Amino acid sequence: MVGAGWVARDFVLPAIAADPHAHLVGVHDRDPAALEGLDDGAPAFDDLDDLLAAPGLDAVYVATPNHAHAPVVLAAATAGIPVLCEKPLAHDVPTAEEMVAATAGLLAGTAFDQRFHPAHEAIAAMVAGDELGVVTTVRIVYGCWLPPDWATPVGGRDNWRVDPARAGGGAMIDLAPHGVDLTGRLLGEDVVDLVALTATRVHDYVDPTADDTAVLAGRTASGTLLSHHVSFSTADPLPRRRLEVVGTRAQLVAEDTLGQDPGGRLTRIDATTGVAEPVPFDAAAGPFTRQLAAFGAAVRGEAPWPYPLDRDLALHALLMEAACP
């Protein structure tokens, strides 16, 4: 694991530990403070090359800030090691293109954990089974509260997510990749047209170009529309994580399924009767656990990785173009 921030510590390490086929070989982070207090028993590596040469290493998970993804991915590619890189691929498109080119012929993926949430997998199965009729719209709200002085729980590190030089933007670049990717996962076809409006309405970030809210509108090739609101300025007690898939026969509403945790609620509303019924799914299974298990299966050659990096690059380019038209 390269990058030992709070997401990696709180969600990826437990996901690795939960997989009976996996074990952690080591952790590297350029910030020594981030390596303190690791209780997983795996050695901390000060040098990336030493980690990549560690015995028994089969794959690398990259969780550095966006602008620092590329050096790690390129080093892993040079060593011929499969790599799973956090979203978005990079802070800009040229760097992402370089990463995709370097990993050609190598197992490589983007860590979009929301693809693997059991509720979202249930939605995708219902869409594929034509249970909703013609799907006209996907509506997504995904927000949180991220003030300028927010610091990660590990080592008091700074808020790089609102530094466009490192992140590539603000709320839109951090949160909207999930929704754009997930729309394709749910529908079986990707967004091909995308426009966006951004604003900074609440937070006084050091760089005023970092947005704290954005709305996006997209369209797939067949004409299904996407309406997506992301926010760093939605107070945590407010309803802020909602996904709706609207069809001519039924509408699905997923509440609190977006994010890192398992659980949430999924409801089907019949278009004829208006009756709302819960849709069962495995509420105990977390998206990170399922994602790591799926990538591990691909590393072992037991199952293909179903999300080619070229596809992720195309969506990244579409999003970045919408952010800076």
Image (cartoon, helix red, strand yellow):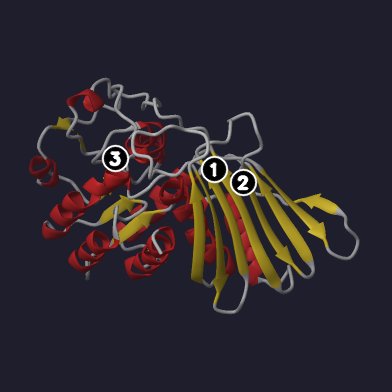
* Camera-nearest residue between 80 and 182: 182
Residue annotated with mark 2 = 282
Q: What amino acid is labelled 3 in the image?
A: His
Binning the other alpha carbons within 10 Å of mark 2 as few (below 14), some (14 to 19) or many (20 upward) gives few
Q: Residue placed at 88% from the left, 57% from the top?
A: 274
* Camera-nearest residue between 172 and 33: 172
Q: Are marks 1 and 2 in contact (CB under 8 Å)?
A: yes
Q: Residue placed at 11% from the left, 56% from the top?
A: 79
Instruction: Tell me the CA gap for discs 1 and 2.
Output: 6 Å
Residue annotated with mark 1 = 285
| Residue 218, horizontal then vertical, whole percent | 55, 66
| Residue 4, horizontal then vertical, whole percent | 28, 33
Tag on residue 23?
Answer: 3
Instruction: Tell me the CA gap for discs 3 and 1.
Output: 19 Å
Q: Residue furthest right?
A: 273
Q: Work out whether mark 2 precedes mark 3 in sequence or the reverse, and give the earlier one.
A: 3
* Above or below 189: residue 174: above
Which label lies toward us, 3 or 1? 1
Residue 246 visible from this viewpoint: yes
Q: What amino acid is labelled 1 in the image?
A: Ala
